[in-house]
Image (spheres, rainbow, N blue to C red):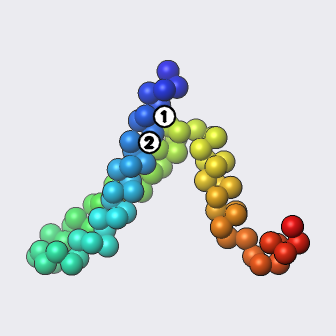
């Protein structure tokens, strides 16, 4: 049962990353501004929703790993020197 949740959660995470990558690229494709605005807005919302649902399916362990990565990457220089 856990296996399909991991696969589905990682798939949703992949869709979210695709949406986040596509958002800054779309304005440079030269499409009509209305279409571009609609697509960027839709992809932004879809990416956020997919990311939220992927966290639900991947569980507490994955959320803990993400928090650990952010703590390591955003430590202040003082905290790094004290360790």
Which residue in the protein does label 1 denote? Answer: 6
Q: Looking at the picture, tell me which residue is in the foreground, 76 or 32.
A: 76
Element under label 2? helix
Which residue is depicted at the point 31% across and 73% down? 24
Look at the image and tell me whether residue 32 can be seen.
Answer: yes
Element under label 1? helix
Q: Is residue 59 above or below residue 19?
A: above
Whole-angstrom CA distance, mark 1 to mark 2, is 6 Å
Q: Position of residue 7 (x, y in %)?
A: 43, 34
Look at the image and tell me whether residue 37 can be seen.
Answer: no
Dot 1 and dot 2 residues touching (CB under 8 Å): yes
Label 1 neighbour load within 10 Å: few <14, some 14-19, many 20+: some
Residue at the right extreme? 82
Which residue is depicted at the point 39% across and 44% down? 12
- Residue 81: quarter of image: bottom right
Q: Position of residue 71 (x, y in %)?
A: 70, 63
Which residue in the protein does label 2 denote? Answer: 10
């Amino acid at each position: 049962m856990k296996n399909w949740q991991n696969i589905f959660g990682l798939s949703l995470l992949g869709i979210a990353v695709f949406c986040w990558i596509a958002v800054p690229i779309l304005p440079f494709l030269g499409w009509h501004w209305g279409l571009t605005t609609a697509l960027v807005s839709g992809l932004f919302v879809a990416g956020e929703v997919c990311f939220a649902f992927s966290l639900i399916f991947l569980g507490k362990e994955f959320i803990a790993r993400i928090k650990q990565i952010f703590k390591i990457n955003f430590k202040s220089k003082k905290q790094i020197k004290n360790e």
